[in-house]
Image (tube, coloured by chain):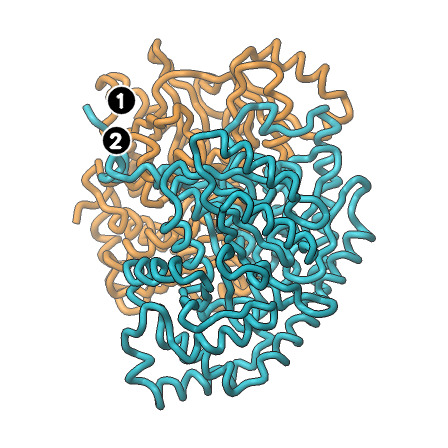
Amino acid sequence: MKRMGIPDRNLTLILIYFKEHMRIAILSGGLNAERDVSLRSGRRVAEALRDTMTDAEIVEVDLNGEFLDSLGSASGVHSFDVVVPLIHGAIGEDATLRSMLELKGIPFVGSSAASAARSFDKGVASGLVPNASAPKFVAFPQSFFREMGAPRILETVIEGIGLPLVVKPISGGSALGVRLCTEAEQVAPALVDAFGYGDRVMLQSAVSGTELAVTVIDIGEEATALPPVEIVPMSGVYDFDARYTAGATEFFVPCRLNADVVQRVSEYAVTVHKSLGLRDISRTDLIVDSYGTIWFLEVNIAPGMTETSLVPQAIEAAGLSVGGVFADLVAQAVTRSN
Amino acid sequence: MAGNRMDPWIDSYAQRAQGLTASAIRALFAVASRPEVVSLAGGMPFVSALDSDRFAEIAARVVREQGAVALQYGSGQGDQTLREQILEISGLVGVRSHPDDVVVTAGSQMGLDLVTKIFCDPGDTVLVESPSYVGALGVFRSYQCNVVHVAMDSEGLDPQALREALVTARASDSPVKLIYTIPSFHNPAGLTQSFQRRQEILAIAQEFNVPILEDDPYGLLGFEGEPPQAIRSLDDQGVIYLGSFSKIIASGLRVGWVIAPHGVREKLVLAAEAATLCPSNFSQLTVSRYLAEQPWQQQIKVFQELYRERRDSLLQSMQALMPAGTTWTVPKGGFYSWVTLPHQLNATTMLPRAISSLVAYVPGTGFYADGQGAHNLRLSYCYPEPSRIEEGVRRLAGVIEAELDLVNTFGVTSSDETNGNSRPQLNPNSDLF
């Protein structure tokens, strides 16, 4: 099996040590609107790991109080050796769950609580990415609109950012609550939609160009970008339906951009990964406009792993397997905790 | 260079499959199954009220004593004894027929599918109430029917509106093949047609020579007086009657039935055999034994009382907690109340906030084929305990208050309409029945 850059000796030692004992919790589900997507991601990764780590016990678990109790205490015995958090959106990709796992002292795959807090908030992440590459944006809570008067704020925002603009919840994924506004009167209804998914909403200049997702796998010494996946939704908008209906979007891996651009976006995604202090795995979503300029959209630290998701395509295009990558990530998580 | 669309057969699907897509609304319902959420969405019968030990014992005896039959293929029309028992049950709503005119189906949903299959070509018109059952709309959509909603008033389907719809359709090139109605304890509207109203509707259907497809899963679950008499009790030639054990015994058995005129029944049996060969013998024999050996009428009374108590809890909670301007129907049986939101709030837009607040409902647009219902939602009181219903209404009232604050802040009403976005469609889903 082709593997990433984890030192062979460590990996071998770990796998031998845990050959008969490794209990891995695939944590999926959760309580937000991405629950269904997360459950599907969890099933897929669990199956892939069962194929790869045939001697390990792979358990799919939902996030609830019982699960947290089952982890035991930081000083006690854990019922799992490692957790693979695949809960998308709030709780899973912000600092909440990861803080709990850190307090419990259990190894887990993926970024730390501190870096999750940075990456999950699209406004914070946009401020940290290199070269001011995020499209112009503002992010406001609902209370600000209510107390200051929405019309005057919207007038300023629309004039300052310009149309078209995108309205989206400051956190969360799967394009839930995201709307493209080409006319001023579309903005207020779009905000009503977006505030249904959270208390802060981002209004961001819409950028057109080639939409790409770049997966970064960070195993061993060096973070590596996998081949970028080019996204062409048949409807023109990569919304929820386009993401999770097979056939609704056409993907190109390798993407149809020239080698120079591919090189730049790959390096860019690795830089985003490092700038935000991420680890193990991330997926940076970006747009390359007609001038070749790279625009940052968001970064995901528990990216979708469903049948139509982007990361599995990138893994396959790199000649790797989902099971192999996650087996390495599991081993790295255990190594890290040791 | 062609890309990968993740489905090699994407260009091969039939036109009727085009609407079968993922939707954010369905994804949201995945959260509703969590115990933290008070789900006022799904119309799931409270099967815990059944004596499960008794059921297990019946099922065991079916296998032990009738295994050679129960585990084998059977008649496409359904078990003869069960068909006779079905007529005993249907007699309670005034339906008189012969066992030969009964077709047993895998739930009445299959009956609905078969009737549509044998009557409707693509483009044919089906008249339905406004709103109508989401599962029926899914069937009609799958056969590419032209679904036309007909207004209801406080007594259900409005005869005048029905007549106008038939006149309009007659002038078009799309013949009306069926009038689909749920006359008793309507899903989702919670309304019940009076006897006089049923007579009026039947007279109009007869005048225009269009069969009525009468869906009656809740007819025996009234909270006061005798069960309403079915339209089929007034005409055995012009009405096709759908019945179900899902609500009076258990939905997991998947046993329903169609009572149809002879000619229709002949085609239904052939269509049923083509679809599934035969209904499950095991389920049929289990139901048949249950009916033969257990006090099933008493069990229906238990369900009636249980659902009445929950209906009362819902209505009292809404009366006490809902923001001004919210209105709702008062069901006299069945599972549902139909709520109209204040100030043109959009129930679909509001759903994510509701899910975040751990309460679920079904947005009204799911009960329309044409995008209406944005300001409505369906609440189901059949499954949660009364105290949970009250808690669910408390949460929902808070959600509505927050949504009012939001639309007041931005001075908008319905974002979907204003923004011209595509209408959300709900494909049939067991969470929604």
For residue A221, side relative to residue B92 (left or right): left
Q: Give whichever of A224, B18 is nearer the camera.
A: B18
- Type of residue at label 2? Pro
Chain A's colour?
orange
Tell me the SS state at disc 1.
Answer: helix
Q: Earlier in the sequence, mark 2 or mark 1?
A: 2
Compared with B244, B404 (above or below) is above
Are the residues under badges 2 and 1 in a single subunit?
yes
Tell me the SS state at disc 2.
Answer: loop
- Type of residue at label 1? Val
In the rendered structure, find residue A227 and report the number of the disc placed on it.
Answer: 2
- Label 1 Cα neighbours within 10 Å, binned few <14 / some 14-19 / many ≥20: some
Q: List x then y, in percent, for residue A12.
A: 22, 56
In the rendered structure, find residue A133 and report the number of the disc placed on it.
Answer: none
Q: List x then y, in percent, for residue A190.
A: 59, 26
Q: List x then y, in percent, for residue B41.
A: 59, 53
Chain B's colour?
cyan
The answer to whether mark 2 and mark 1 are in CB contact below 8 A is yes
